[in-house]
């Protein structure tokens, strides 16, 4: 759900789609885990999504 939500939100803009996608997906991921805030230090440099094939990887900057 977090990846799909990120794609929907990113579709509303013409610029910075990747940044907006990542932000929206991370917020949903945190809410899904029961958190009310997103600590960027905790997720920096971590892989937040990997496809079953291991080809599509999304990593936080």
Image: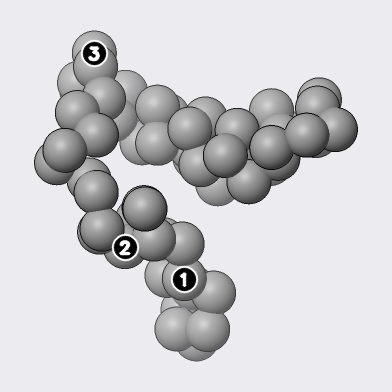
Q: Is 10 positioned to the left or the right of 43 in the image? A: right
Q: Estimate how packed mark 3 is, as few (under 14), some (14 to 19) or many (20 or more) residues with alpha carbons within 10 Å.
A: few
Asked whether disc 1 touches disc 2, contact meaning CB atoms under 8 Å apart, the reply is yes
**Disc 3 versus disc 2: distance between alpha carbons?**
21 Å
Nearer-N-terminus badge (1/3): 3
Q: Which element type, helix, strand or loop, lies under badge 2?
A: strand
Dot label at residue 36:
3
Q: Which element type, helix, strand or loop, lies under badge 3?
A: loop
**Disc 1 versus disc 2: distance between alpha carbons?**
7 Å
Q: Which residue is mark 1?
A: 57
Q: Which residue is mark 2?
A: 47
Q: In this rendering, is residue 29 above or below 56?
A: above
Nearer-N-terminus badge (1/2): 2
Residue 54 % position (x, y): 45, 83
Q: Estimate how packed mark 2 is, as few (under 14), some (14 to 19) or many (20 or more) residues with alpha carbons within 10 Å.
A: few
Residue found at the far top of this picture = 36
Q: Is 53 positioned to the left or the right of 10 in the image? A: left
Q: Is 18 positioned to the left or the right of 40 in the image? A: right
Which quarter of the figure has residue 46? bottom left
């Amino acid at each position: 759900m977090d990846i799909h939500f990120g794609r929907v939100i990113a579709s509303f803009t013409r610029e910075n789609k990747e940044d907006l996608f990542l932000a929206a997906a991370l917020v949903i991921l945190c809410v899904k885990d029961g958190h009310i805030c997103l600590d960027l230090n905790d997720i920096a440099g971590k892989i937040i999504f990997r496809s079953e094939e291991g080809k599509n990887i999304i990593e936080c900057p």
